[in-house]
Image (tube, rainbow, N blue to C red):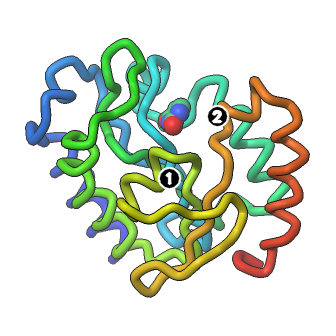
Amino acid sequence: MVEAGYETVAREIIKCTRCPLHKSAIRRVIGKGSCNPKVFFIGEAPGKSENETGIPFYGRAGKELDKMIEYMRLSEEDWMVTNTVKCHPPENRKPRTNEIECCKPFLLSQIILLNPKIIILLGNTAEKSFCPGRKLEWGVPVEHEGRMILKLYHPAALIYTSSKKEIQRAFIDKNRDLWS
Ligand code: URA
């Protein structure tokens, strides 16, 4: 049932021409993970390798996300990951506000269908997309429109700033109840 709804959304994403990003995209990057997730991760935008494969977090940031998921002690059935936009922005730039807004109905449909316990916003772009105008504290969960959300560092930020890895682990340790 959920899978059928999810497939319908996926077909709409594949056909989408709402914003200019579709013109340069090779693949639409829809999502990866379980259709019955406790945790729904929102990243920023597909990078070059995601554009080539159609799989979110396929590249280096993906390896870091895998480590994070392992540290959270989530099993394969427990999580799903997607991005604020489903098409790769040229030159790896950040997605623009209008692109994020055009893609948001897809993100919201995915969330409504999958009904996760907690949404984890990976970085500021995910925050801007999911709760525009709201400034969350890193690692502090809040309720937003009836759902628990938590802002954590984007996995790419952990690659370049190793001090953030320890802080991220502390945020995870503090919030385990949200997905256990
Ligand atoms: N960074 C993101 O935010 N998303 C991806 O899919 C890959 C890298």
Answer few, some or many: residues within 10 Å of disc 1's Cα (few below 14, many 20 plus, some between 14 and 19). Answer: many
Q: Quadrant of residue 139?
A: bottom right
Residue 178 vertical position relative to residue 97 in the rendered view, above or below: below
Residue drawn at (44%, 25%) of the image: 53
Give the x, y percent position of residue 161.
79, 29
Residue drawn at (69%, 69%) of the image: 140
State whether label 1 is within 8 Å of ligand 1. Answer: no
Q: Quadrant of residue 6?
A: bottom left
Depth check: 153 or 7 in front? 153
Depth check: 174 or 114 in front? 174
Count of marks placed on residues:
2
The kind of residue on which mark 1 rests is Ile
Q: Quadrant of the N terminus?
A: bottom left
User: The residue tagged with tag 2: helix, strand or loop?
Assistant: helix
Give the x, y percent position of residue 91.
37, 12
Residue 153 lies left or right of residue 10; in this view the side is right
State whether label 2 is within 8 Å of ligand 1. Answer: yes
Residue 123 lies left or right of residue 112; in this view the side is right
Residue drawn at (44%, 65%) of the image: 134
Give the x, y percent position of residue 90.
31, 17
Q: Quadrant of residue 73?
A: bottom right
Residue placed under numbered mark 2 in the picture: 62
The kind of residue on which mark 2 rests is Gly
Q: Quadrant of the C terminus?
A: bottom right
Q: Which mark is residue 42?
A: 1
Residue that lies at the very extreme toward the left in this rendered image? 17
Q: Which mark is residue 89?
A: none
